Amino acid sequence: MADENDDFPELDSGVVERLNALGEEDGAMRANALRAGLTDYDLDDDDYEVLEMSEYDPDAIVYLPALPVLAIVGRPNVGKSALVNRIIGRREAVVEDTPGVTRDRVNYKGEWAERKFTIVDTGGWEPDAKGINASVAAQAEIAVDLADAVLFVVDATVGATSTDEHVVRMLRGTKKPVILVANKVDDVRQEADAAALWSLGLGEPWPVSAVHGRGVADLLDKVMTVLPEVSAVAKEEVGGPRRVAILGRPNVGKSSLLNKTAGEERVVVNAMAGTTRDPVDEQVEIGGKFWRFVDTAGIRRRVNLSQGADFYATLRTSAALEKAEVAIVMIDVSEVISVQDLKIIDLVLESGRALVLAFNKWDLLDDERRKYLEREIEQDLSHVAWAPRVNISAKTGRHMEKLVPALEIALESWDTRIPTGKFNALLAELTAEHPHPVRGGKQPRILFGTQAASRPPTFVLFTTGFLDPQYRRFITRRLREIFGFEGSPINVNMRVREKRKR
């Protein structure tokens, strides 16, 4: 993964002095002049919405809209991934005629009738032969927890199986809207197969052919009637204790950390990996402040899975992140930093939450392991070098008091908003200091920039051409050097716009 520290020139200290000297009024005048220049360019409704945000109070916290979440559930090999591909309009989900081939990637962005939403494809697991009913039901249960609406996909050519009926019993108890999809109905002759699924008791079956696209438009029209405009599960809560997710691979010490901060045995701690089963939501006092430690809403029972365990861990992590504002990712220093550690960090980055790295079991570290650990951190964690690091022992309580300042720094960065005038002054300094390379005889120009949201800090650049990823990393690095943003991811997005034809 590329980090933000590519080979860029060192920061000129004069830039900081000039930005600090820029008065609020002068900055506003500069921003208004640049924004006025955008009238010469073709802008769409979304552009105007972003530009309106640039006029907000610089101290205001602005959330990105929480897109409604549509989960797709069903037993293996009923065509869930094919349906995902049909809905998102491209072949992105893995499709193979073998149950359980879907793996890590489970979230996709969809759009229908000018409405955007998130799709969760819950197909990625391999149940054992004995536990298939419980496995599929648990999968559907997680999906319901994480979603605003659910598509339950059944293979109409096979009919309702005992596994399907097992899932239906769980779905009937949910308050979320569930739409029954009868897949593999390729022509009128198979409509009767779909009609037979009325027996499941989930209402009208919607006949579709995910492979051929038949009936999918009607299905999506129906979905739009039950999906809310803004997600009810992913919506942000304002006020109250800040919400912290404790993440990490099995047996890294998450439960020990929660018990130590809560001051009592709240969670069963066992040397066997993966013993935490139930959702844990604890309000604890650390450093004179109350915090809400959130664990997952999801699996409510033990599920015996083989390769599917990683998939469930990913869903549990996603569920915790939905509820959290900042994530503590725990890393066991007595072991080599693993692919699983990096995947969990990537999930935090994708979620846009603030990040603190807690290196646990520090009391077990000897000099030789410390030397290798520093090398691993330098090589594997360079892309999150901006995250506060805390060395702790959750078991003994060593250095636990350092967690609070790290959490506060990360959350303050996550909440930060840069005035539009100051941001555009910075962009002018950066393009003068390090112009974008010429591509195809043209040099892309940045016309105007604004911070569209905080939580996480999200910047939008209106440009005349595509900016190289390396150049966007250069801008991100300068934002960190000048404004801090320690512990928070930063998003820098582009909107390439052409001049309006006279």
Image (tube, rainbow, N blue to C red):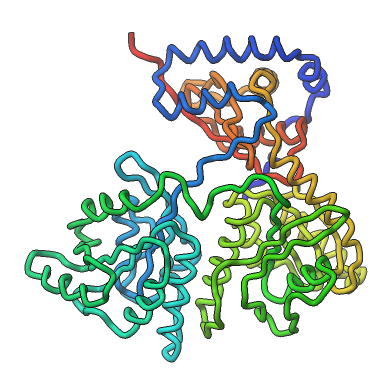
Q: Is residue 195 left or right of residue 53?
A: left
Q: Position of residue 312 (x, y in %)?
A: 53, 72
Quadrant housing residue 428 = top right
Q: In this rendered view, identify the residue nearer to me: 326 or 497.
A: 326
Relative placement, left or right, of 292 versus 369 is left
Position of residue 323 relative to residue 498, above or below, is: below
Q: Quadrant of residue 187?
A: bottom left
What residue is shown at x 85% (from left), y 49% (from top)? 405
**Residue closest to the eye, 99 or 293:** 293
Q: Residue furthest left?
A: 189
* Quarter of the view holding residue 191: bottom left
Relative depth, front residue between 384 and 265: 265
The C terminus, quarter of image: top left
Q: Is residue 399 above or below residue 60?
A: below
* Residue depicted at x 19% and y 64%: 207
The total number of labels drawn is 0
Q: Is residue 303 left or right of residue 148?
A: right
Decide: is 300 above or below 346. Answer: below
* Residue 483 drawn at (x, y percent): 76, 32
The answer to whether residue 377 of the structure is visible from this angle is yes
The spot of residue 18 in percent (x, y) is: 79, 16
Residue depicted at x 8% and y 64%: 188
From the viewer's perspective, is residue 459 above or below residue 429? Answer: below
| Residue 89 in view, yes or no | no
Coordinates of residue 472 in the picture (x, y in percent): 60, 34
364 vs 444, left or right, is right
